[in-house]
Every structure is written in structure tokens, then in C-alpha cells.
Image (cartoon, helix red, strand yellow):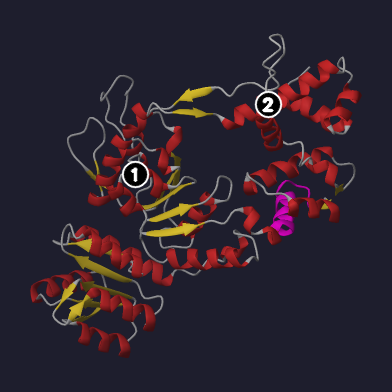
Amino acid sequence: MSQHVLIIDDEPDLLELLGMTMSRMGLTVDTANCVRAAVNKLANNRYDLCLTDMRLPDGDGIDVIKYGQQHCPGLPIAMITAHGDVETAIDALKLGAFDFLNKPVEMPRLKKLVESALKSAVTPPLDASQQLLGEAANIKALRDTIAKVARNQAPVFIHGESGSGKELVARLVHNMGARKDGPFVPINCGAIPSELMESEFFGHKKGAFTGANSDKPGLFEAANGGTLFLDEIADLPLNMQVKLLRAIQEKKVRPVGSHSEIDVDVRLLSATHKDLTQLVADGQFRADLFFRLNVIEINVPALRQRKADIPLLAKHILAKMGHSDTLLSQEALHALHEYDFPGNIRELENILERAVALCDGETINTDDLQLNNNAYSQLQKAARLETPATNAKAKAPFPTPQQHINEDGEAYIDLEAYLGEVEKKLITDTLDACRWNRTAAAKKLGLTFRSLRYRLEKLGIE
């Protein structure tokens, strides 16, 4: 059965052109030249896609979108806007429009949009609860938001603390949408050296610079037809932010060393644990780029905001590790419930991995969790200790954090490396004080002997 499309425009020539193009695609086409006629058609017919101009004689395309959201749930509605009318397009996306096209309409882009929209209309919904576990109210609300966002092509900004599951949310948006059969390309913006960033994003031609021995496609090309996920977008240098903004606006990229541009069709998802609004206010992130990325915002709750889900998450993590028969005692579950989890779900995974190595039998007890002796707790202890200023020979209780310089010339601390040094220093100093009697050192550190042995092996202490 042919799929049914409604086209709304008051320009007869454009209406005829769009209708002919879609008829050649094997679609049954209806037309309307104003909001009133469009609403009447939507009320009395079932459509698989609606394409509307922004400016109409008796209103605008926003009125059509609002009507469609209320009376035709699930109907993809795409907007045609005047070239450069970015604010209107973004308003349409926020209201639930599937996507937008700029005038003059380019037929290849129109065909891609139509194919993607029709595909989204018949895509069976994925059960997000199988991947985003939890019964807390904020997690149920998050799953509902993901399902809604997945139905359109709007850029999505995902905000949440480190380890809370931002990439999982991005993958769900991709897998539940029309692009699920296309590539999902994740990239950590903070992990790319600044001098290679343009080449990584847009690709390069052979001979473009020293070491460019062959043509290389960039991340935008790799994600063509799918989704590009820019994690830690706040770490993007200012000069690269300008180039990214242009790629988003023009939907074209120019490889380094090339004289021509390449059309790209990607959905852009971005994420960070930082406060982008504050970075914009401080001049460290471009407001116009933030405006384009933050069309729809998704906030991922921290684990401490959904503690009722800890037993379910722990069971799932243990099963994923191959320890589905391992159980947590009631005391251990209570201890996890009282813990704040600064590292969120990633930290819970690490805690359980360590607990499995330490526990005797198939039950994890409170001591096996080592919640008061993990690296985060040690860092807090280190912050409270002061180096004796009166004794020149006294050792500093903990190493001084080593500062590094990023590509923007800003100082930062490698937290994970520093936490490892803190833990190693604490253990070796205690062993020195106990003349390397491990039993005595474990007692002073509040650890079991088995736990200390595990940490010695992990930290490479002989």
C-alpha cells in the first residue's frame, strides 16, 4: 500500500514541484495551501508524513505542528523555512517537528528527509527498559523523554555527572529512531589533540600535511546516515567550535587539503558533565553553538538520586560480570544505599568488581565493598591532612597533585592518576610503619588481609 503524504504551501509552483517529486517516489500526495485546509485534511485522513511551509496565509507551520502533536501523535511533520531562519527552525524542532529544510529546497536533501521520516513512522518502538534499567520515577521519565526525542532529528544535548550513563542515553536515542540501521559514531572531544581535531572531524586528503599518506574520511563522513555523538563537548577548543557550527548549519564538511565540500547527513548528539551555560557566560563556549546543540536537553539523574534502583542495578552488573549466583547481603545493600556514589554507576561497577574478588563464597558482605577505603574516601582524607611545617624531614602525607596543561593553556589535574597515587602512598607508608608486616598494616588500614593483598597486586606494590 502506498504511503500517504500531505504537503502544505501557498506557492503553487513549489507545491507542484514537491508533489511531483514525492509522486515519483511512489507516494500518494495530498496538498493544502493554508492552515485551515491543512487541519481539515489532517482531521479526516491518515498520513504517514506532513511537510509544511513556515509562512502561510492564515497562520504558520508552527500551528500545524501544534495541531499534529495534539491530534496526530506519531505523525512526522517537517518544516520548510526561509534560508537562515535558524530560530524558527529550532522553535519547530522544540515543539516536536521531525526536521526542517531551508529554501530553496534541494531535491536530494528532500528525498533523504522523506525516506528518513517515513522510516521513523514504521519503526517499531524499542523497549528502553531493557537497556536503561530502573523503576525510579526520574528514570521512567527519562525513558519517556528518550522515546519522544528519538522520533525526530533535532540535536540533543545530554547533561549528567561522569559515570551516570550519558552515552547509553545517546545510544538509545539512536537505536529507537529512524537512523537505527545507520552508524553510531561516539567520540570524546577531550581525547583528540587540538592539532588533529579538524582532520579527525572532517577528514583529510593525501598530502594535506606531513604524515597524511592517504585520504582519510572524518567522523562526519563515518556517521553519514546515522548519528554522531560528541561526548565532553565542553572540551572543544574555541577555534574548532566555529568549524563545527558551520558544519551543522550547512550540513557540509570540507576535508583538510580539499577544494570541495561533501554533503553529510548526520544527527548530532552531544554531552558533558560541565555547566555549558556557565562556560558560555565565561566566554569559553560559543553561545551560537550552544544554541544549536541544545535544541532538546536531556538530564541524566545521578545514582544518588535513584537509590531505590541500586539492588536492580547491582544484580544486573553482577550477571554481566558472569556472577549471577553472587548475592549481596542485606547489610551490604544498606551500605550501598547510604553511600553517595560520586562516581555514579561506573563507580558501582568498580565496587562490585572489587567485592567479587574479595568475598568468600557467593555472598558479598559490607566489608567486601570497602566503601570507606576506596580512592574517593582517601582523597577526602588527603584534603583534610596537613603537612607538618615545623619538621623539615617529615614526609608529606600524600603526593601533591601534578598539574598538566591542556591545549587551551589551562591547568588541570588527572584525577584518576592522582587517586591511584594517594592510595599507593597511604598503603606503602603504612607498610613502612609496620616494617612490611602485611597483617599489621591491613589492621591499621581497616582492611582484611585478603583486601590488602588484592590492592598490592592491583597497584603493583611488591
Answer with left or right where residue 327 lies relative to residue 352: right
| Quadrant in the picture for residue 431 | top right
- Amino acid type, callout 2: Val
**Front residue of this view, candidates 366 and 393:** 393
Is residue 175 a member of the stretch shown in magenta? no
Whether residue 35 is visible, yes or no, is: yes
Answer with left or right where residue 1 lies relative to residue 21: right
Which of the labelled discs sits on residue 220, or is there none? 1
**Front residue of this view, candidates 263 and 242:** 242
Mark 2: secondary structure: helix
| Quadrant in the picture for residue 130 | bottom right
Q: Please provide percent x and percent y for residue 252.
A: 24, 46
- Amino acid type, callout 1: Phe
Question: Looking at the magenta stretch, what is its main secondary structure?
Answer: helix
Q: Please provide percent x and percent y for residue 95.
A: 34, 70
If the image is split into quadrants, where does the C terminus sit?
top right
Q: Residue at x 12, y 77 (%)?
A: 10
Q: Residue at x 36, y 34 (%)?
A: 200
Question: Which residue was labeled with disc 2?
Answer: 422
Disc 1 to disc 2, C-alpha distance = 41 Å
Whether residue 3 is visible, yes or no, is: no
As drawn, 164 above or below 204: below
